[in-house]
Amino acid sequence: AQTVTQSQPEMSVQEAETVTLSCTYDTSENNYYLFWYKQPPSRQMILVIRQEAYKQQNATENRFSVNFQKAAKSFSLKISDSQLGDTAMYFCAFMKRTGTASKLTFGTGTRLQVTL
Amino acid sequence: NAGVTQTPKFQVLKTGQSMTLQCAQDMNHEYMSWYRQDPGMGLRLIHYSVGAGITDQGEVPNGYNVSRSTTEDFPLRLLSAAPSQTSVYFCASSPGLVNTEAFFGQGTRLTVV
């Protein structure tokens, strides 16, 4: 079974600064996907960024980028130029590439507070 | 563009009552799933479906039933509600293995007293 660990329950960052959220995972699979989801106070789950394990290049989406280290099973999220609207819970998630989709394994989340 | 629609958004049940949480998607997605979210535990998979007529258990299936008679609908049934089922429930759908993005409903906050 896969496990996903987020070791930072809470983090705080000032507006316009950069913050990195950590995620490690454990799996025996070689082909898989990794995701970061954002959950603002509205409770809606929003996909932030996705990484395919067979791609060596780190994914980037505007101010969001990842540092994917497959050998170390690490998948951190960097948020640059933090904005107040980035305040949310952030969940790291794992999905096997083979088998069934929509079968995500989530970490316990990191609550990020962006302050003025 | 409705996406994934869950009803109700809030529900209070008495111990022993049964109810069905509804989930519908209008994106013709094959894959659908139910998760529960508890403080400090992230989201955990309850049941999932890879297509109409096919369902399987996830990590925490006890006390819940599902069925998938159509591509669009994937209801979650609580057979006899218990306080341990107090949680926020999310339904999700995704197109398939090629496009893996999961789309989530807005969640149902369920309280069992």
Image (tube, rainbow, N blue to C red):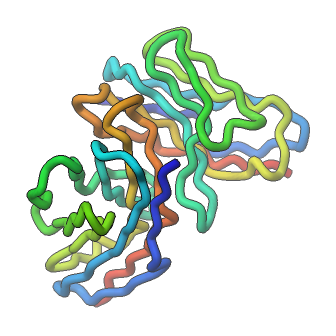
- For this rendering, which residue is in front, B111 or B81? B81
Residue B8 visible? The answer is: no
Residue drawn at x 23%, y 55% is A49
> Could you tell me residue A79's position as x and y percent?
21, 74
Tell whether A64 sits left or right of B4: left
- Is B76 placed above or below B102 here? above
Residue drawn at x 90%, y 37% is B16
> Could you tell me residue B61's position as x and y percent?
68, 36
Specify the quadrant of the image occupied by residue B46.
Answer: top right
Tell whether A34 sits left or right of B14: left
Residue drawn at x 33%, y 64% is A73
Tell whether A9 sits left or right of B25: right
> Could you tell me residue B90's position as x and y percent?
53, 42
Residue B101 visible? The answer is: yes
Report the number of discs.
0
- Is A14 placed above or below B20 here? below
Tell whether B15 sits left or right of B19: right
In the rendered image, the quadrant that contains the N terminus of chain B is: top left
